[in-house]
Image (tube, coloured by chain):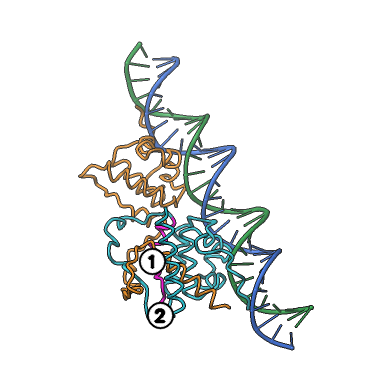
Chain colours: A cyan, B orange, C blue, D green
Amino acid sequence: MGVPTPILSPSERGPLGQYLWSLRKAAQMTQREVEEASERKVSNAYLSQIETGAIPSPSPAILQELSKVYGARLPANAPVTCSYERMMELAGHLCPAREAAAQPTQRLTSFAGEQLTPEEEDELLKYLAFIRMRKGKK
Amino acid sequence: MGVPTPILSPSERGPLGQYLWSLRKAAQMTQREVEEASERKVSNAYLSQIETGAIPSPSPAILQELSKVYGARLPANAPVTCSYERMMELAGHLCPAREAAAQPTQRLTSFAGEQLTPEEEDELLKYLAFIRMRKGKK
DNA sequence: CCGGCCTGCTTGATTTCCCAAGCAATTGCC
DNA sequence: GGCAATTGCTTGGGAAATCAAGCAGGCCGG
Protein backbone atom coordinates (compact mmCIF):
# COMPACT_ATOMS: atom_id res chain seq x y z
CA MET A 1 0.00 0.00 0.00
CA GLY A 2 1.45 3.25 -0.96
CA VAL A 3 1.06 6.45 0.87
CA PRO A 4 1.24 8.84 -2.05
CA THR A 5 3.22 11.76 -0.75
CA PRO A 6 1.16 14.44 0.97
CA ILE A 7 2.44 16.95 -1.55
CA LEU A 8 0.96 19.82 0.41
CA SER A 9 2.35 21.11 3.66
CA PRO A 10 -0.24 21.93 6.30
CA SER A 11 0.37 25.62 5.95
CA GLU A 12 -0.48 25.51 2.28
CA ARG A 13 -3.97 24.24 2.94
CA GLY A 14 -6.68 26.63 4.00
CA PRO A 15 -7.58 26.96 7.68
CA LEU A 16 -10.45 24.54 7.39
CA GLY A 17 -8.38 22.20 5.24
CA GLN A 18 -5.61 22.12 7.81
CA TYR A 19 -8.00 21.28 10.58
CA LEU A 20 -9.82 18.54 8.69
CA TRP A 21 -6.61 17.09 7.43
CA SER A 22 -5.14 16.86 10.90
CA LEU A 23 -8.37 15.31 12.15
CA ARG A 24 -8.26 12.65 9.48
CA LYS A 25 -4.60 11.93 10.15
CA ALA A 26 -5.31 11.69 13.85
CA ALA A 27 -8.07 9.20 13.09
CA GLN A 28 -5.63 7.38 10.83
CA MET A 29 -8.09 7.20 8.01
CA THR A 30 -7.74 7.55 4.27
CA GLN A 31 -9.99 9.84 2.27
CA ARG A 32 -11.80 6.87 0.81
CA GLU A 33 -12.31 5.39 4.24
CA VAL A 34 -13.94 8.61 5.31
CA GLU A 35 -16.17 8.43 2.28
CA GLU A 36 -17.20 4.93 3.29
CA ALA A 37 -17.66 5.79 6.96
CA SER A 38 -19.90 8.68 6.02
CA GLU A 39 -22.11 6.33 4.01
CA ARG A 40 -20.99 7.96 0.78
CA LYS A 41 -22.31 11.31 1.88
CA VAL A 42 -18.85 12.85 1.45
CA SER A 43 -16.95 11.71 -1.59
CA ASN A 44 -13.20 11.28 -1.40
CA ALA A 45 -12.83 13.71 -4.28
CA TYR A 46 -14.67 16.42 -2.46
CA LEU A 47 -12.83 15.73 0.75
CA SER A 48 -9.58 16.18 -1.09
CA GLN A 49 -10.68 19.54 -2.41
CA ILE A 50 -11.76 20.65 1.02
CA GLU A 51 -8.50 19.59 2.62
CA THR A 52 -6.38 21.27 -0.01
CA GLY A 53 -8.35 24.46 0.40
CA ALA A 54 -9.89 24.41 -3.07
CA ILE A 55 -13.31 24.51 -1.43
CA PRO A 56 -13.16 26.82 1.58
CA SER A 57 -16.81 26.64 2.62
CA PRO A 58 -18.51 23.29 2.33
CA SER A 59 -22.13 23.10 3.37
CA PRO A 60 -23.05 22.49 7.00
CA ALA A 61 -24.39 19.07 6.04
CA ILE A 62 -20.95 18.00 4.86
CA LEU A 63 -19.25 19.36 7.96
CA GLN A 64 -21.81 17.67 10.16
CA GLU A 65 -21.09 14.38 8.49
CA LEU A 66 -17.34 14.76 8.86
CA SER A 67 -17.81 15.74 12.46
CA LYS A 68 -19.75 12.56 13.11
CA VAL A 69 -17.14 10.39 11.44
CA TYR A 70 -14.14 11.89 13.19
CA GLY A 71 -15.93 12.24 16.49
CA ALA A 72 -16.62 8.54 16.42
CA ARG A 73 -13.28 7.39 15.08
CA LEU A 74 -10.82 9.57 16.91
CA PRO A 75 -8.79 7.78 19.56
CA ALA A 76 -9.29 9.02 23.08
CA ASN A 77 -5.78 10.42 23.30
CA ALA A 78 -5.76 12.15 19.96
CA PRO A 79 -3.72 15.34 19.69
CA VAL A 80 -6.72 17.17 18.24
CA THR A 81 -10.37 17.27 19.18
CA CYS A 82 -13.26 17.10 16.79
CA SER A 83 -15.64 20.03 16.97
CA TYR A 84 -18.45 20.72 14.55
CA GLU A 85 -18.69 24.29 15.66
CA ARG A 86 -15.02 24.79 15.03
CA MET A 87 -15.49 23.47 11.52
CA MET A 88 -18.37 25.83 10.96
CA GLU A 89 -16.32 28.72 12.16
CA LEU A 90 -13.33 27.84 10.00
CA ALA A 91 -15.66 27.48 7.04
CA GLY A 92 -16.90 31.01 7.58
CA HIS A 93 -20.37 29.82 8.52
CA LEU A 94 -20.29 31.33 11.97
CA CYS A 95 -22.42 29.01 14.00
CA PRO A 96 -23.92 31.46 16.31
CA ALA A 97 -24.78 32.73 19.68
CA ARG A 98 -21.77 31.13 21.25
CA GLU A 99 -19.13 33.20 19.53
CA ALA A 100 -18.92 35.57 22.44
CA ALA A 101 -19.09 33.54 25.61
CA ALA A 102 -18.09 30.13 24.45
CA GLN A 103 -14.39 29.39 24.74
CA PRO A 104 -12.41 31.86 26.73
CA THR A 105 -10.37 29.50 28.85
CA GLN A 106 -11.37 26.02 27.90
CA ARG A 107 -8.77 25.45 25.24
CA LEU A 108 -5.63 26.04 27.17
CA THR A 109 -3.72 23.21 25.66
CA SER A 110 -4.46 19.84 24.26
CA PHE A 111 -0.94 18.51 24.19
CA ALA A 112 -0.39 15.33 26.09
CA GLY A 113 3.21 15.35 27.18
CA GLU A 114 3.57 11.65 27.68
CA GLN A 115 2.37 11.07 24.14
CA LEU A 116 5.26 12.90 22.56
CA THR A 117 8.39 11.04 21.68
CA PRO A 118 11.60 12.93 22.41
CA GLU A 119 12.17 13.35 18.71
CA GLU A 120 8.73 14.80 18.25
CA GLU A 121 9.19 17.13 21.14
CA ASP A 122 12.48 18.26 19.72
CA GLU A 123 10.99 18.93 16.32
CA LEU A 124 8.07 20.75 17.82
CA LEU A 125 10.30 22.95 19.90
CA LYS A 126 12.34 23.85 16.88
CA TYR A 127 9.25 24.60 14.92
CA LEU A 128 7.94 26.72 17.75
CA ALA A 129 11.13 28.70 17.78
CA PHE A 130 10.76 29.10 14.06
CA ILE A 131 7.26 30.46 14.08
CA ARG A 132 8.04 32.74 16.99
CA MET A 133 11.05 34.12 15.19
CA ARG A 134 8.97 34.60 12.10
CA LYS A 135 6.38 36.57 13.99
CA GLY A 136 8.97 38.50 15.97
CA LYS A 137 10.73 39.68 12.86
CA LYS A 138 7.50 41.05 11.53
CA MET B 1 -48.16 52.53 -1.30
CA GLY B 2 -49.88 49.47 -2.52
CA VAL B 3 -50.01 46.28 -0.64
CA PRO B 4 -49.77 43.89 -3.58
CA THR B 5 -51.84 40.95 -2.49
CA PRO B 6 -49.85 38.27 -0.69
CA ILE B 7 -50.79 35.81 -3.43
CA LEU B 8 -49.42 32.92 -1.47
CA SER B 9 -51.10 31.54 1.59
CA PRO B 10 -48.68 31.02 4.47
CA SER B 11 -49.24 27.29 4.37
CA GLU B 12 -48.06 27.13 0.79
CA ARG B 13 -44.68 28.51 1.67
CA GLY B 14 -42.10 26.10 2.98
CA PRO B 15 -41.44 25.82 6.69
CA LEU B 16 -38.53 28.20 6.50
CA GLY B 17 -40.40 30.55 4.19
CA GLN B 18 -43.35 30.66 6.53
CA TYR B 19 -41.15 31.52 9.46
CA LEU B 20 -39.19 34.22 7.68
CA TRP B 21 -42.33 35.68 6.20
CA SER B 22 -43.97 35.95 9.60
CA LEU B 23 -40.80 37.50 10.97
CA ARG B 24 -40.76 40.13 8.27
CA LYS B 25 -44.43 40.87 8.75
CA ALA B 26 -43.92 41.19 12.48
CA ALA B 27 -41.09 43.62 11.83
CA GLN B 28 -43.40 45.46 9.39
CA MET B 29 -40.77 45.58 6.71
CA THR B 30 -40.91 45.18 2.97
CA GLN B 31 -38.59 42.82 1.13
CA ARG B 32 -36.63 45.75 -0.25
CA GLU B 33 -36.33 47.27 3.17
CA VAL B 34 -34.80 44.06 4.38
CA GLU B 35 -32.38 44.17 1.48
CA GLU B 36 -31.39 47.68 2.51
CA ALA B 37 -31.17 46.89 6.20
CA SER B 38 -28.89 43.96 5.45
CA GLU B 39 -26.56 46.26 3.54
CA ARG B 40 -27.48 44.59 0.27
CA LYS B 41 -26.27 41.25 1.48
CA VAL B 42 -29.70 39.73 0.88
CA SER B 43 -31.40 40.84 -2.30
CA ASN B 44 -35.15 41.29 -2.35
CA ALA B 45 -35.37 38.83 -5.21
CA TYR B 46 -33.68 36.14 -3.24
CA LEU B 47 -35.70 36.88 -0.15
CA SER B 48 -38.85 36.43 -2.15
CA GLN B 49 -37.71 33.03 -3.35
CA ILE B 50 -36.83 32.00 0.15
CA GLU B 51 -40.17 33.10 1.55
CA THR B 52 -42.15 31.37 -1.17
CA GLY B 53 -40.23 28.20 -0.58
CA ALA B 54 -38.51 28.15 -3.96
CA ILE B 55 -35.19 28.08 -2.14
CA PRO B 56 -35.47 25.80 0.88
CA SER B 57 -31.90 26.01 2.13
CA PRO B 58 -30.17 29.36 1.92
CA SER B 59 -26.62 29.53 3.15
CA PRO B 60 -25.88 30.18 6.82
CA ALA B 61 -24.48 33.57 5.88
CA ILE B 62 -27.84 34.63 4.50
CA LEU B 63 -29.73 33.35 7.51
CA GLN B 64 -27.28 35.05 9.82
CA GLU B 65 -27.91 38.33 8.07
CA LEU B 66 -31.67 37.96 8.22
CA SER B 67 -31.41 37.04 11.85
CA LYS B 68 -29.48 40.20 12.56
CA VAL B 69 -31.98 42.37 10.72
CA TYR B 70 -35.08 40.92 12.32
CA GLY B 71 -33.47 40.60 15.71
CA ALA B 72 -32.75 44.30 15.65
CA ARG B 73 -36.03 45.46 14.11
CA LEU B 74 -38.59 43.29 15.85
CA PRO B 75 -40.76 45.12 18.38
CA ALA B 76 -40.50 43.92 21.92
CA ASN B 77 -44.01 42.51 22.00
CA ALA B 78 -43.83 40.73 18.67
CA PRO B 79 -45.86 37.55 18.34
CA VAL B 80 -42.81 35.69 17.06
CA THR B 81 -39.22 35.62 18.19
CA CYS B 82 -36.21 35.73 15.96
CA SER B 83 -33.88 32.78 16.31
CA TYR B 84 -30.92 32.06 14.08
CA GLU B 85 -30.75 28.48 15.23
CA ARG B 86 -34.38 28.01 14.40
CA MET B 87 -33.69 29.27 10.90
CA MET B 88 -30.78 26.89 10.55
CA GLU B 89 -32.92 24.02 11.65
CA LEU B 90 -35.79 24.89 9.31
CA ALA B 91 -33.29 25.20 6.48
CA GLY B 92 -32.07 21.69 7.16
CA HIS B 93 -28.68 22.88 8.35
CA LEU B 94 -28.97 21.17 11.70
CA CYS B 95 -26.90 23.26 14.04
CA PRO B 96 -26.31 20.82 16.85
CA ALA B 97 -27.12 22.00 20.30
CA ARG B 98 -27.09 18.51 21.69
CA GLU B 99 -23.58 17.17 21.44
CA ALA B 100 -21.79 19.17 24.06
CA ALA B 101 -21.06 15.95 25.89
CA ALA B 102 -19.13 14.37 23.07
CA GLN B 103 -15.66 15.60 23.90
CA PRO B 104 -14.35 14.98 27.39
CA THR B 105 -12.28 17.67 28.93
CA GLN B 106 -8.73 17.48 27.79
CA ARG B 107 -5.87 16.96 30.14
CA LEU B 108 -3.70 19.97 30.07
CA THR B 109 -0.11 19.01 30.03
CA SER B 110 2.22 21.85 29.53
CA PHE B 111 4.36 21.56 26.48
CA ALA B 112 7.81 21.62 28.03
CA GLY B 113 6.64 24.42 30.26
CA GLU B 114 6.03 26.73 27.35
CA GLN B 115 3.33 29.33 27.39
CA LEU B 116 1.56 28.79 24.13
CA THR B 117 -0.75 31.23 22.48
CA PRO B 118 -3.78 29.62 20.85
CA GLU B 119 -2.35 30.36 17.44
CA GLU B 120 0.93 28.72 18.33
CA GLU B 121 -0.77 25.69 19.75
CA ASP B 122 -2.81 25.41 16.63
CA GLU B 123 0.21 25.50 14.37
CA LEU B 124 2.06 23.03 16.52
CA LEU B 125 -0.80 20.56 16.48
CA LYS B 126 -0.94 20.70 12.75
CA TYR B 127 2.77 20.27 12.47
CA LEU B 128 2.69 17.36 14.87
CA ALA B 129 0.11 15.61 12.76
CA PHE B 130 2.30 16.28 9.77
CA ILE B 131 5.51 14.82 11.15
CA ARG B 132 3.68 11.85 12.61
CA MET B 133 2.21 11.06 9.29
CA ARG B 134 5.59 11.45 7.61
CA LYS B 135 7.21 9.11 10.04
CA GLY B 136 4.28 6.73 10.10
CA LYS B 137 4.74 5.79 6.50
CA LYS B 138 8.48 5.86 6.07
C1' DC C 1 -58.50 58.20 -16.27
C1' DC C 2 -53.40 58.30 -15.85
C1' DG C 3 -48.80 58.41 -14.93
C1' DG C 4 -45.85 57.52 -10.82
C1' DC C 5 -44.74 54.65 -6.85
C1' DC C 6 -44.78 50.81 -4.25
C1' DT C 7 -45.50 45.91 -3.58
C1' DG C 8 -44.30 40.76 -4.16
C1' DC C 9 -42.69 37.89 -7.62
C1' DT C 10 -40.08 35.82 -11.93
C1' DT C 11 -36.16 35.17 -15.02
C1' DG C 12 -31.42 34.87 -17.07
C1' DA C 13 -26.91 34.53 -15.95
C1' DT C 14 -23.07 33.82 -12.78
C1' DT C 15 -20.95 31.58 -9.01
C1' DT C 16 -20.38 27.88 -5.96
C1' DC C 17 -21.02 23.27 -4.36
C1' DC C 18 -20.59 18.36 -5.06
C1' DC C 19 -19.51 13.94 -7.14
C1' DA C 20 -18.40 10.01 -10.70
C1' DA C 21 -14.57 8.94 -13.07
C1' DG C 22 -9.99 9.03 -13.93
C1' DC C 23 -4.81 10.24 -13.34
C1' DA C 24 -0.20 10.04 -11.14
C1' DA C 25 2.69 8.60 -7.65
C1' DT C 26 4.14 5.34 -4.21
C1' DT C 27 4.66 0.79 -1.97
C1' DG C 28 4.68 -4.29 -1.45
C1' DC C 29 5.21 -8.69 -3.58
C1' DC C 30 6.70 -11.89 -7.11
C1' DG D 1 12.00 -5.35 -13.27
C1' DG D 2 6.73 -5.78 -13.44
C1' DC D 3 2.14 -5.87 -11.66
C1' DA D 4 -1.55 -5.08 -8.45
C1' DA D 5 -3.20 -2.38 -4.84
C1' DT D 6 -3.81 1.90 -2.66
C1' DT D 7 -3.35 6.77 -1.89
C1' DG D 8 -4.02 11.84 -2.72
C1' DC D 9 -5.41 14.76 -6.20
C1' DT D 10 -7.69 16.68 -10.71
C1' DT D 11 -11.35 17.16 -14.08
C1' DG D 12 -15.93 17.60 -16.34
C1' DG D 13 -20.32 18.43 -15.57
C1' DG D 14 -24.88 18.51 -13.14
C1' DA D 15 -27.32 20.76 -9.45
C1' DA D 16 -28.13 24.30 -6.34
C1' DA D 17 -27.53 29.09 -4.60
C1' DT D 18 -27.52 34.01 -5.50
C1' DC D 19 -28.34 38.40 -7.58
C1' DA D 20 -29.32 42.20 -11.18
C1' DA D 21 -32.91 43.35 -13.86
C1' DG D 22 -37.42 43.28 -15.08
C1' DC D 23 -42.66 42.14 -14.78
C1' DA D 24 -47.59 42.51 -13.23
C1' DG D 25 -50.62 44.46 -10.41
C1' DG D 26 -52.59 47.51 -6.44
C1' DC D 27 -52.69 52.23 -4.55
C1' DC D 28 -52.51 57.07 -4.68
C1' DG D 29 -52.61 62.39 -6.08
C1' DG D 30 -53.49 64.91 -10.10
Which chain hosts label 1?
B
User: Is A85 contained in the magenta span?
Assistant: yes
Q: Position of residue D25 (x, y in %)?
A: 44, 29
Is D2 placed above or below A64 here? Answer: below
Left or right placement of residue A80 versus residue B74 in this view? right
Q: Position of residue B24 (x, y in %)?
A: 33, 42
* Residues at marks 2 and 1, CA–CA distance in whole angstroms: 16 Å
Residue position for label 2: A115
Instruction: Give the residue type that dot 2 points to.
Output: Gln
Q: Chain of mark 2?
A: A
Asked which secondary structure carries label 2, the reply is helix
Label 1 packing within 10 angstroms: few (<14), some (14-19), many (20+): some
The residue that mark 1 highlights is: B121
State which region is magenta. Answer: A76-91
At numbered mark 1, what does the secondary structure look like: helix, strand or loop?
Answer: helix
Q: Quadrant of residue C28?
A: bottom right
